[in-house]
Image (spheres, rainbow, N blue to C red):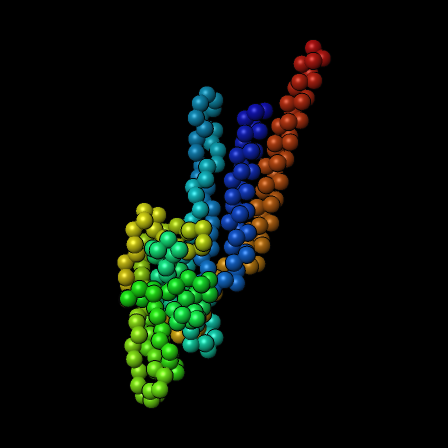
């Protein structure tokens, strides 16, 4: 019975981690550029005495779905979507860089370009700083241009170029703040393979309906594991009573 109890406990533990991933996905279904998490589970042989056919579930860690989300037109010049597989580069609180598809850009009071989470967007010269201007445009290649205050509309000045990078899918992991990075700490390579779409915004690659269905399936499977543990206890109690009768 102890083996049956262990199998149920092991399965319930893995399902709890899967539930956490689906819950986080559902909570971020409306976050621009969000990349869904999914829990990988591996089958591993049980070591020690017993049948060689015994296997249990082992967590393979949390992985990230890098597929693109839906792109919608917003008409806002500071909303930028990536047409391709590259990522924006943003600054981290530690002073390094991380990667995101979040393109709901805005200007801070200091004139720095940041995304909706307040993370500074990096260009070729570091954080993209925008001087006072009459108008601002972001080109397909990431070039940020402005018409300075007091200048004619025909005067256009290039301020910086938003960096785009290509990530290694085999090394990608998600930070606690939702940004992406390489597991080995290496920096992603700059890329010119994608084009930016100003006035558009990419949504999360999460389906709210699908996430809800997955959560319900996880809940049902969890109940089965708990039922297995309960049955193991009942069988153990029955065996104990029989031994006492003898």
* Residue 239 in the image, given as x and y percentages of width and height: 66, 19
Q: Is residue 121 visible?
A: yes
Question: Looking at the image, which residue is at 43% across and 43% down?
Answer: 61
Quadrant for the C terminus, please: top right
Quadrant for the N terminus, please: top right
Q: Is residue 39 above or below residue 51?
A: below
Question: Looking at the image, which residue is at 43% across and 31% down?
Answer: 45
Q: Residue furthest front?
A: 110
* Residue 187 in the image, given as x and y percentages of width and height: 30, 54
Q: Is residue 202 visible?
A: no
Q: Is residue 215 above or below residue 56?
A: below
Q: Residue furthest top?
A: 246
Q: Is residue 93 above or below residue 239?
A: below
Q: Is residue 183 above or below residue 241?
A: below
Question: Looking at the image, which residue is at 45% across and 50% down?
Answer: 176
* Residue 134 in the image, given as x and y percentages of width and height: 39, 83
């Amino acid at each position: 019975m102890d083996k049956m109890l262990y199998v149920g406990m092991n399965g319930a533990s893995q399902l709890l981690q899967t539930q956490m991933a689906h819950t986080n996905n559902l909570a971020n279904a409306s976050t621009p550029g969000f990349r869904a998490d999914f829990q990988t589970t591996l089958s591993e042989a049980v070591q020690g005495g017993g049948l060689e056919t015994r296997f249990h579930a082992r967590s393979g860690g949390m992985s990230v779905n890098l597929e693109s989300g839906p792109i919608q037109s917003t008409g806002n010049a500071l909303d930028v979507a990536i047409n391709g597989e590259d990522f924006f580069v943003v600054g981290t609180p530690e002073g390094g860089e991380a990667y995101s598809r979040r393109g709901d850009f805005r200007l801070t009071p200091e004139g720095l370009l940041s995304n909706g989470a307040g993370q500074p967007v990096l260009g070729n010269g570091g954080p993209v700083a925008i001087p006072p201007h009459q108008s601002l445009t972001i080109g397909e290649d990431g070039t940020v241009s402005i018409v300075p205050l007091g200048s004619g509309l025909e005067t256009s000045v290039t301020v910086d170029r938003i960096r785009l990078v290509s990530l290694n899918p085999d090394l990608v992991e998600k930070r606690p703040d939702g940004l992406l990075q390489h597991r080995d700490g290496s920096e992603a390579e700059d890329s010119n393979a994608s084009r930016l779409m100003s006035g558009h915004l990419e949504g999360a690659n999460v389906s709210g309906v699908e996430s809800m269905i997955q959560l319900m399936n996880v809940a049902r499977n969890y109940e089965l594991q708990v039922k297995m543990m309960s049955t193991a206890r009942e069988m153990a109690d029955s065996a104990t009573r029989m031994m006492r009768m003898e």
